[in-house]
Image (spheres, rainbow, N blue to C red):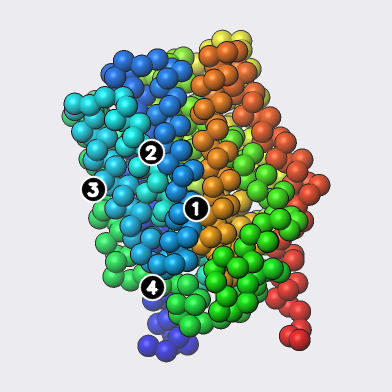
Amino acid sequence: MASGSPQAPKTDLKRLLLTLHLPAISMGLGLGITVPVLPELTKELGVGLEVASLVFVAQLVGTLAAPLPTGYLIDRLGRRRVLLAGPLVTAAASLLVAKVAIDGSYYELLIYRFIAGWGEQMWMLSRITVIADTGASSQRGKQVTSMFGVQQIGNLTGPVIGGIAAVAWGLWSPFVMHAAIVLIAIIPSFLLLRESAPDRRGQTPAAGSPAPAGSPAPGARPEDGVWRRLLVPPLPAVFAVQFLANVTRGGIFGGGVIVLYAAYAYNLEPDELGYLRGAMAAVGIPIIFAGGFVMDRFGRKYTIVPGLILSASAMGFLAATAYFDASYAWFIAAFTAVHMAVNVISGNMQTLGTDVAPVNARGMFFGVSRTVAQGGAALSPASFSALTSIAGSAAAFSFLGGAAFLGAIIVIFLVPETLRRVESAKNAPAP
């Protein structure tokens, strides 16, 4: 079928829905199903709040260890192979966690959570690379945030389903459901997903997606030019902001320490946590989609700066509720404010990365970028655990908020608006 035929847009939309949105929904649904169950599982395994935080640390360490080797494989083997492998690894890890819930140890749980984080990052990193390969600069914000937005649709119903299933059938059941959902959702990708790497397609970058300065020449090895570009401003500032933003976000997304805090400080049950997380997912969906529109229409910084400042303020509010031992109603208000704020910055750092990634080595670039970001995400529950033990939960939440505020300052003074630069390059006359 010719690309200019009326059916081509419908075909592209179908492929986008089945290979991007459907897997994203399944990953979000699966994650949402398991999140409210993990605090109860750690209780059943006989560990306290400080040690229980490690269940999220282990998963985030997996996402920290995965990007560099995954980025290398994306450039060497192609986007498609790695993207398909990620959900398979995630499903296998979830089945192993189900085994722990029946008869296992806390140390086994940590190992399998590490594997789950690795599989999740394989899918995320390869999917972002595909968007960078195929999306025009004026569309990337909407494409990236739509991926996160539809994942929130999965998060919307997942916690409720997981909480009810855990109460009705046992703590093992949500993890089996997670594995089944992910495996079913990836089937269309095996049939429809095409390789998008420019060198493997024998194509140059699409119009409207010019190579950033410092990109290696066509035919060069993927690693050529990448390491040099990592030191070119504003890349060091971008990496610093990615790190700091994920220190804050790591306490919220993926379950995070805020769920553990609610379970231990207010004795919430898995189904109650499920309802809370589901409600927050509903609140986040329109915020995430609106963020993509704003980034593509006005610029990336129009969401990054307000989102980081709001996240810092909301974390300060949550710290105050912990310090004053506030009532459950005040905690719910702070819980809602934090989730709304961090949803403002969902996908914007990834969009920023697609603007500056070297065309011929996007996998390796995103490998480095996501390693930095996931380092911040892994520090989030680790710092919470340490600071809670030393100075209490209020100090821990204050630290998470301070990281977001510092990130906002760096963006204001050290990171230029990348959308304007990319669009200027696109409209410049050819030499």
Of the numbered discs 2 and 3, the one sitting upstream in the chain is 2
Quarter placement of the C terminus: bottom right
In whole angstroms, how far apart are the C-alphas of marks 2 and 3?
19 Å
The residue at which mark 4 appears reads as 194
Q: Is residue 48 above or below residue 289?
A: above
Q: Are marks 3 and 1 in contact (CB under 8 Å)?
A: no
Residue indicated by mark 3 = 180
The circle on residue 114 is 2
Which dot, 4 or 1, sits closer to the camera? 1
User: What residue is rendered at 53% in x and 60% in y?
Assistant: 364
The residue singled out by tag 1 in the image is 68
Residue 72: x and y, percent? 47, 60
Q: x and y percent of residue 289 in the render?
A: 55, 53
Q: Are marks 2 and 4 in contact (CB under 8 Å)?
A: no
**Is label 1 in a helix, a strand or a loop?**
helix
Tag 3 secondary structure: helix
Tell which circle, 3 or 4, labels the residue nearer the N-terminal end. Answer: 3
Q: Of the residues shown, which amino acid type is indicated by label 1?
A: Leu
Amino acid on which disc 4 is placed: Arg
